Amino acid sequence: MIGLDTNVLVRYITQDDPSQAAGATRLIEGHCSGDSPGWISSIVLCELVWVLRRAYGYQKADVLAVLDQLLITLELKVEDEEIARLAVDAYKTGGADFSDYLILLSNTAAGCETTYSFDGRLARHPAAEVPR
């Protein structure tokens, strides 16, 4: 298994820099397989969403399509895949950022009864509250 950093995934997905995109494509398509997948950490997922939304102007629906594809691709392995899937589902319908849902659902999986946040959009989720 090999680890993939955010910038490699961004180059592979966007194909915006010909040289780096070619290297990312060779790496992912040549070294990632069902038997030896490329590892995508939760931090990389969060960074990827941020970069695609903020730097590349991807719409939320396009980012969701990327996340869905990453989660079903056998040649890639996402850290805490079940939590990542739940975070994607919450992000689809919720108003908070993907990373906030990933944090909240990771906390829930760790046994936290509530996640406190000053993010009012996240606090709409039943497992979150604004500190009072």
Image (cartoon, helix red, strand yellow):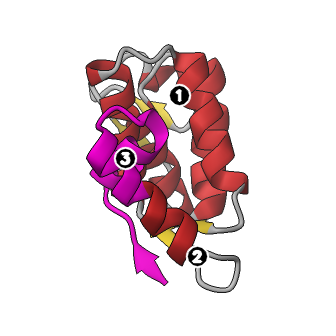
- Badge 3 or badge 2: first in the primary sequence: 3
- Badge 3 or badge 1: first in the primary sequence: 3
Disc 3 versus disc 2: nearer the observer: 3
Element type where label 3 sits in the image? helix
The foreground one among 83 and 55 is 55
Q: In this view, does 82 lie to the left or right of 15?
A: right
Coordinates of residue 20 in the picture (x, y in percent) = 29, 49
Q: Which segment did they paint magenta?
A: 1-24
Disc 3 versus disc 1: nearer the observer: 3
Residue identified by numbered label 1: 63
Q: In the image, what residue occupies the spot 57% across and 52% down?
A: 84
Q: Is residue 15 left or right of residue 108?
A: left
Residue identified by numbered label 2: 37
Element type where label 2 sits in the image? loop
Q: In the image, what residue occupies the spot 52% across and 77% down?
A: 31
Which amino acid type is marked by label 2?
Pro
What's the distance in space between the residues labelled 3 and 1, CA to CA?
Answer: 19 Å
Coordinates of residue 100 in the picture (x, y in percent) = 40, 36
Q: Is residue 114 above or below residue 110?
A: above
